[in-house]
């Protein structure tokens, strides 16, 4: 867990108020409120704060492990089981396993991407298709994507729709 107590202490030490951050440096009050509740901070914001407060990132935040988890494989999911809390296990679907094989379209997409040296993030940017959609096709979670999606992927990969669809 990321904690920002050092930020508040440093601000007090340097005489920088939240009002100053908001009105002088343009940091939103909503973002400051989120930090007070342990929400994430963008690296660009961390960089700005380090400049404003003339400090290092370690002067602003600390990291402590929330919990220790063990991993248990069961059927088609991974269970992260807390070793220190008696909470319900977090269940995460397994992307590929013997019981969850990928779809031929996903295999074909992966092969073409590998041949052309195009990572999924770049394909997403070039095709305009969201990265999660591409991942779902790659891992066989989406087996019947929209035609527009396939056309955009084929164009970004420099192949015909027929070539992308053939088994």
Image (cartoon, rainbow, N blue to C red):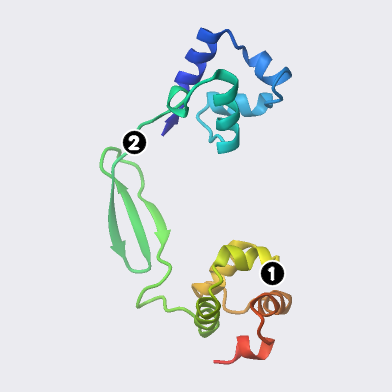
Please report whichever mark, 2 or 1, sits nearer to the chain's N-terminal start: 2
Is residue 71 placed above or below 29 in the rendered structure? Answer: below
Q: Quadrant of residue 105?
A: bottom right
Q: Residue at x 58, y 24 (%)?
A: 51
| Residue at screen point 55% across, 81% down | 112
- The residue wearing badge 1 is 127
Expressed as whole percent of the image width and height from the top left, the position of residue 86 reads 30, 40
Query: Is label 2 in a helix, a strand or a loop?
Result: loop
Give the Cα separation between the discs numbered 2 and 1: 38 Å
Viewer can see residue 129:
no
Q: Is residue 127 visible?
A: yes
Quadrant of the image containing the C terminus:
bottom right
Nearer to me, 145 or 22: 22
Residue 127 location (% of width, % of height): 69, 69
Q: Is residue 107 above or below residue 76?
A: below
Query: How many marks overall?
Result: 2
Return the residue nearer the eye: 56 or 92: 56
Which of the two discs, 2 and 1, sits closer to the camera?
1
Quarter of the image with the N terminus is top left
Label 2 sits on residue: 65
Residue 35 image label = none
The residue nearer to you, when weighing 159 against 30, is 159
Evaluate if marks 2 and 1 touch, with contact meaning CB atoms under 8 Å apart: no
In the visual, does 81 lie left or right of 32? left
10 Å crowding of disc 2: few (<14), some (14-19), many (20+): few
Relative vertical location of residue 18 with respect to residue 34 in this rendering, above or below = above
Mark 1 is surrounded, within 10 Å at the Cα level, by few (under 14), some (14 to 19) or many (20 or more) other residues, namely many
């Amino acid at each position: 867990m990321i904690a920002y107590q050092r930020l508040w202490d440093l601000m007090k030490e340097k005489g920088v108020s939240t009002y100053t951050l908001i009105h002088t440096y343009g940091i939103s009050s909503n973002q400051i409120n989120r930090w007070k509740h342990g929400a994430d901070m963008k690296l660009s914001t961390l960089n700005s704060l380090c400049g404003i407060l003339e400090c290092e990132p370690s002067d602003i935040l600390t990291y402590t492990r929330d919990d220790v988890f063990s991993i248990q494989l069961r059927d088609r999911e991974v269970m992260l089981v807390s070793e220190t809390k008696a909470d319900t296990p977090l269940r995460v679907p397994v992307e590929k396993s013997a019981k969850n094989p990928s779809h031929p379209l996903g295999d074909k997409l992966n092969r073409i991407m590998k041949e052309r040296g195009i990572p999924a993030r770049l394909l997403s940017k070039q095709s305009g298709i969201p990265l999660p959609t591409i991942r779902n096709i790659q891992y066989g979670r989406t087996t019947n994507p929209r035609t527009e999606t396939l056309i955009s992927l084929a164009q970004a990969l420099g192949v015909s729709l027929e070539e992308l669809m053939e088994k």
